[in-house]
Image (spheres, rainbow, N blue to C red):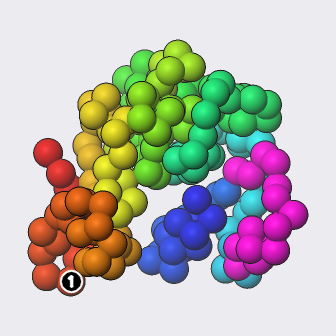
């Protein structure tokens, strides 16, 4: 999420990061600093206008693919607020806030999907390197991104890399 926010700003978009529980690990401290250096506000909680159409899209990158169990605070609240923003705006008849999940939708088990029963279904999923097993339960637009896997590793684990067109780093899968 931190890297995505920085890249979005570099491509001319506005971005806000919601980071409810900051890590003290140097890597994450540096990523936050990089966001702040390019003018990305880093907030502790969802902005109040998130549920009334204040944002066209929300990038969901709360948890990594190793997440297990039920979402705990303060992340459970952030996840609920994301879902509320997605539903509230679409119910008003205006443009819906699109939720774009990175790799695995937050709160989902990497293999089994929404085992915690959050009811969370993002509009878009961007799988990094290769789709995870849980993506079989995903119903929106699905993209795979990143040519991060060396051919020998792909062969070792029998991973079929998509036929990226040209120099593209992303492609939609159907």
Identify the residue at horizontal 87%, vertical 63% (top origin). Answer: 24
In which quadrant of the rendered image does the C terminus lie?
A: top left
Residue 155 found in image quarter: bottom left
Residue 102 position within the rendered picture, expressed as x and y whole percent measured from the top left: 46, 52
- Horizontal side of residue 153 vs 83, given as left or right: left
Q: Which residues are magenta?
A: 18-34
Residue matched to label 1: 167
Is residue 39 placed above or below 87 in the rendered structure?
below
Identify the residue at horizontal 46%, vertical 44% (top origin). Answer: 104
- Horizontal side of residue 65 vs 173, given as left or right: right
Is residue 22 placed above or below 154 in the rendered structure?
above
Choose between 36 and 70: the one closer to the eye. Answer: 70
Choose between 156 and 140: the one closer to the eye. Answer: 156
Choose between 154 and 13: the one closer to the eye. Answer: 154
Residue 135 position within the rendered picture, expressed as x and y whole percent measured from the top left: 33, 38
Whether residue 145 appears in this view of the structure is no
Whether residue 102 appears in this view of the structure is yes
Is residue 124 placed above or below 143 in the rendered structure?
above
Residue lying furthest top: 117
Residue lying furthest front: 156
Identify the residue at horizontal 50%, vertical 69% (top origin). Answer: 8
Residue 127 position within the rendered picture, expressed as x and y whole percent measured from the top left: 36, 54
In which quadrant of the rendered image does the N terminus lie?
A: bottom right
Say few, some or many: other residues with alpha carbon within 10 Å of mark 1 (under 14 / 14 to 19 / 20 or more). Answer: few
Residue 45 colored magenta?
no
- Horizontal side of residue 44 vs 103, given as left or right: right
**Element on which disc 1 rests:** loop
């Amino acid at each position: 999420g931190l890297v995505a926010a920085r890249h979005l700003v570099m491509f001319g978009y506005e971005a806000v990061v919601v980071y409810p529980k900051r890590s003290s690990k140097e890597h994450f401290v540096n990523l936050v600093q990089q966001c702040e250096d390019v003018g990305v506000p880093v907030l502790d909680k969802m902005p109040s206008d998130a549920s009334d159409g204040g944002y066209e899209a929300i990038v969901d990158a709360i948890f990594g693919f190793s997440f297990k169990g039920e979402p705990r605070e303060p992340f459970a609240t952030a996840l609920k607020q994301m879902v509320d923003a997605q539903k509230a705006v679409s119910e008003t008849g205006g443009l819906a806030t699109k939720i774009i999940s990175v790799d695995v939708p937050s709160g989902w088990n990497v293999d089994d999907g929404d085992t915690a029963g959050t009811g969370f279904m993002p509009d878009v999923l961007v799988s990094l390197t290769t789709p995870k097993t849980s993506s079989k339960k995903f119903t929106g637009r699905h993209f795979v991104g990143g040519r991060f896997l060396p051919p020998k590793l792909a062969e070792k684990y029998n991973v079929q890399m998509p036929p990226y067109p040209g120099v593209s780093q992303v492609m939609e899968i159907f």
